[in-house]
């Protein structure tokens, strides 16, 4: 509808003069309700000269729009500064500003609307809120219309007297026969349960309405975990104990969890574990003590020439392959044990033996190659190549004697040679190999090779001095044997008689007085029975006759052998070894000792342990304090027992519920409890949640019982959740002592059940009007907030009674629809 501005009457009258006036009319209106939204409007207009005039309108029937006029009396036309404020109590709810320059000879109308959509909208210094957005305060004259003496109400459809949009006020503002349509009292937080019943917002939340009752909607990342609306959304949902939702605890195996973007993530894995599948839901699932994941995901434990093991996340050698050892920093068993620097064990160096180069064979240092002219005739490595090969007993090779028939022999680099022939013999064929093979007492070679006796001197006769020559007869004391004159007392061919040869077995014979004897035995043979008739009958390479008749081989701790005429070790007795290579003391070392375990010089010294050698095998007798033999393939007590994987004993994991663990002095204990858990009992770990009524924030601290309330400890702090229909209105105690069904506390603490012009009651926490105190008034919209809002004597929509409208041609007079 339109109203004439009485305030401007005097101004408009001056328009009757011949000169048109230059004026500005300011009108302020609002869509906010009184008295729930606003109780007054303040308007201040300052003219170009700086003179200000204000008007305050207490809202009620007929108080809007609020108007002021400015008449130009000379000087500049602008700017005219305008400020309008909507006030409730002492608080400015909404405001609007403008800056206008008047136009000469025109009366302009400036309408400013204080709109609900501008509540809470902050604009810059030179801007103001209009229709919910910021616009410049400067208003151009082209935006204004000429004032015709009337001002339309805010949002009123011209000509009908009805608002274009319904206002929540219990009336049919847009004249469509419906009251407060478009307002959802079940979900609108500004009109929850009825017009103007605004819902409050609390910390970390926005106001909400659900089923006509005020609630809150939590800001993102916050939760109302105690169920108490007045504490707002008190819980940060980005912690491991409240991750994305109330009570959603991040529990990840073998890991310290964290909450990121409302999802549980792994902050850090427990020692010895890792999240190898990159899946936080199953935690740190991989124990890093296996050959495929040793100390890190995907780190394979593989070693050269060795059987590996993984203990404590470290790849180690469990056992070396035969003939290999772990001697250096390289991975695995990198060192072959058949070299001169590492023979049978790391660092065992083979020194060159006498007259030879060194060698390592069968895990023992020995003789490689003898120096030319020397031989290892006794087969023992300890004394190297001990035998000179230029002697008559060992000529060129071990045991090869240099003895030539009927000759004095000598050993040269080329072998055995004739030094001189025995008397009566000569080397007629020029070969050293068969010695002085030709006797010079035969007619074919008489006194010299090829000197043949024939004709008148057919016999070979021995002259005085031992010389021989061809003669016709034999001399005195000689006997004719065939065509030779011989002394049968000393001839080896005719000893004691013709053709009785003196040739003892394995010996050089001698004939004296016609009797055959032994001058010397062949190398390697001996006349052990003293009987010359069977020669040198005994071989001297047996363990009973080794190198001489009376030498028997008896080697301690071994089976004896005779090699090159010297006693030697054939095989050692079980668990004995010939470590010094000397046959004289036999197999002198036991192989079940800590210094030589199973092999000469192989120490039994397992890591972090006291060792024992049994049957030639090194084993752990006892571990050093704080270590364990957790890997049976290792060579000692390889595992410290103060880790979370092996705490106190092998394989004893220190994994306590709801806790960060530590293993100190080999005992698994709690280092730090998880946020909402404590170690309250003798049970292992942090077994007690401190978010329960029995243990609230600490062990044994109870939450409740309370009067008319239930204790809640969802956040680790005790909160009383009031029973339905009760409230904690004095806040001095957690008790819910106040019934919320009285007119002073109706549905909430301090919520008074008061309605203008009405008697009220509070039933089940809801305010209701029981009767109107002013005659001919009624509560037609069933909303207690605006009281008995209808005058049944004048209301065209409720004329004489609620829901009894007059027609368009009628007016309600004294409660009766009347045509005027």
Image (tube, rainbow, N blue to C red):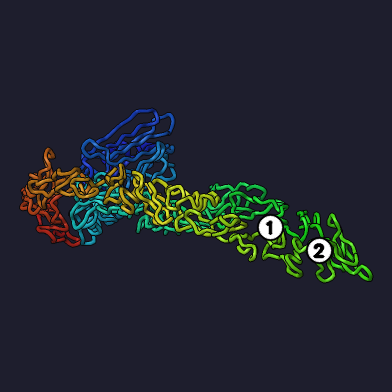
> Mark number for residue 520?
1
Q: Is residue 769 left or right of residue 624?
A: left
Residue 414: x and y in percent read: 78, 57
Most foreground residue, 612 or 418: 418
Residue 424: x and y in percent read: 82, 60
- Residue occupying image coordinates x 35% and y 54%: 263
Most foreground residue, 432 or 253: 432
Disc 2 target residue: 478
Where residue 801 sits, quadrant-wise, is bottom left
Q: Is residue 169 above or below residue 476?
A: above
Residue 159: x and y in percent read: 29, 55
* Mark 1 Cα-neighbour bin, 10 Å: few <14, some 14–19, many ≥20: some
Q: Is residue 378 above or below residue 69?
A: below
Nearer to us: label 1 or label 2: 2
Q: Is residue 428 left or right of residue 720?
A: right
Number of callouts: 2
Most foreground residue, 410 or 654: 410
* Mark 2 Cα-neighbour bin, 10 Å: few <14, some 14–19, many ≥20: some
Q: Is residue 1 visible?
A: no
- Residue occupying image coordinates x 36% and y 42%: 110
Residue 790: x and y in percent read: 13, 53
Q: Which quarter of the figure is the C terminus placed in?
A: bottom left
Element under disc 1: strand
- Residue occupying image coordinates x 62% and y 57%: 564
Most foreground residue, 183 or 219: 219
Q: Which residue, as the protein is rendered here, is positioned at the far right?
A: 455
Q: Is residue 457 visible?
A: yes
Element under disc 2: loop
> Mark number for residue 730?
none
Q: Is residue 244 left or right of residue 611?
A: left
């Amino acid at each position: 509808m339109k109203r004439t501005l009485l305030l401007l009457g005097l101004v408009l009258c001056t328009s009757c003069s011949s000169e048109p006036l230059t004026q500005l009319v300011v009108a302020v209106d609002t869509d906010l309700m009184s008295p729930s939204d606003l109780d007054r409007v303040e308007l201040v207009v300052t003219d170009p000269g700086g003179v200000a005039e204000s008007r305050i309108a207490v809202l009620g029937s007929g108080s809007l729009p609020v108007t002021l006029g400015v008449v130009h009396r000379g000087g500049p036309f602008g700017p005219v500064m305008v400020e309008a404020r909507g006030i409730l109590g002492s608080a400015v709810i909404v405001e609007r500003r403008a800056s206008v320059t008047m136009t000469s000879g025109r009366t302009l109308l400036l309408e400013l609307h204080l709109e609900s959509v501008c509540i809470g909208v902050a604009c810059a210094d030179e801007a103001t809120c209009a229709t919910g957005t910021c616009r410049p305060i400067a208003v151009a004259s082209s935006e204004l219309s000429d004032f015709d003496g009337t001002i339309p109400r805010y949002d009123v459809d011209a000509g009908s007297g009805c608002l274009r949009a319904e206002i929540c006020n219990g009336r049919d503002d847009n004249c469509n026969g419906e009251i407060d349509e478009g307002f959802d009292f079940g979900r609108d937080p500004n009109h929850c349960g009825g017009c103007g019943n605004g819902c409050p917002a609390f910390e970390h939340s926005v106001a909400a309405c659900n089923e006509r009752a005020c609630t809150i909607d939590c800001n993102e990342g916050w939760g109302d975990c105690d169920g108490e609306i007045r504490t707002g959304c008190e819980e940060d949902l980005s912690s491991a104990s409240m991750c994305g939702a109330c009570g959603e605890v991040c529990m990840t195996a073998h890991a310290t969890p964290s909450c990121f973007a409302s999802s549980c993530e792994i902050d850090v894995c427990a020692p010895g574990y890792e999240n190898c599948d990159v899946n936080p839901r199953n935690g740190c699932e991989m124990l890093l003590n296996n050959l495929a994941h040793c100390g890190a995901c995907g780190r394979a434990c593989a070693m050269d020439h060795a059987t590996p093991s993984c203990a404590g996340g470290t790849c180690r050698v469990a056992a070396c392959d035969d003939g290999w050892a772990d001697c250096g920093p390289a991975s695995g068993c990198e060192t072959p044990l058949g070299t001169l620097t590492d023979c049978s064990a790391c660092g065992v160096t083979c020194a060159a033996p006498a007259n030879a180069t060194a060698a390592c064979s069968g895990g023992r240092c020995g003789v490689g190659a003898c120096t030319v002219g020397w031989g290892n005739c006794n087969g023992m490595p300890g004394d190297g190549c001990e035998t000179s090969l230029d002697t008559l007993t060992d000529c060129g090779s071990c045991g090869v004697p240099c003895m030539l028939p009927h000759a004095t022999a000598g050993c040269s680099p080329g072998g055995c040679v004739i030094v001189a022939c025995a008397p009566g013999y000569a080397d007629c064929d020029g070969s050293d190999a068969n010695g002085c093979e030709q006797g010079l007492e035969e007619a074919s070679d008489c006194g010299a090779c090829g000197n043949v006796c024939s004709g008148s001197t057919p016999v070979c006769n021995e002259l005085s001095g031992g010389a021989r020559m061809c003669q016709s007869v034999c001399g005195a004391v000689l006997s004719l044997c065939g065509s030779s004159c011989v002394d049968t007392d000393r001839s080896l061919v005719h000893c004691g008689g013709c053709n009785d040869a003196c040739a003892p077995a394995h010996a050089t014979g001698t004939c004296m007085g016609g009797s055959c004897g032994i001058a010397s035995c062949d190398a390697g043979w001996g006349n052990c029975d003293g009987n010359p008739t069977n020669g040198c009958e005994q071989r001297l390479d047996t363990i009973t006759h080794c190198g001489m008749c009376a030498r028997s081989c008896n080697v301690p701790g071994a089976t004896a052998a005779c090699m090159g005429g010297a006693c030697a070790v054939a095989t050692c007795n079980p668990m004995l070894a010939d470590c010094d290579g000397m046959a004289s003391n036999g197999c002198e070392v036991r192989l079940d000792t800590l210094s030589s375990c199973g092999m000469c010089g192989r120490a039994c010294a397992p890591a972090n342990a006291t060792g024992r050698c049994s049957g030639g095998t090194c084993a752990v007798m006892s571990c050093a304090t704080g270590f364990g033999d957790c890997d049976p393939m290792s060579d000692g007590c390889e595992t410290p027992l103060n880790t979370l994987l092996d705490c106190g004993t092998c394989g004893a994991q220190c994994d306590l519920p709801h806790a960060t663990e530590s293993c100190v002095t080999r005992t698994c204990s709690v280092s730090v409890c998880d946020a909402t858990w404590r170690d309250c009992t003798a049970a292992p770990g942090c077994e007690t949640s401190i978010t329960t009524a029995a243990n609230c924030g600490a062990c044994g601290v109870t939450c409740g019982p309370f009067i008319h309330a239930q204790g809640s400890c969802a956040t680790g702090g005790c909160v009383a959740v009031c029973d339905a229909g009760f409230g904690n209105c004095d806040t001095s105690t957690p008790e819910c002592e106040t019934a919320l069904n009285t007119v002073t506390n109706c549905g909430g603490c301090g919520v008074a059940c008061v309605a203008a012009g009405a008697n009220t009651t509070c039933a089940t926490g809801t305010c209701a009007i029981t009767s109107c105190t002013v005659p001919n008034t009624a509560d037609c919209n069933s909303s207690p907030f605006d009281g008995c809002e209808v005058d049944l004597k004048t209301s065209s929509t409720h004329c004489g009674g609620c829901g009894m409208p007059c027609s368009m041609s009628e007016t309600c007079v004294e409660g009766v629809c009347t045509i005027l």
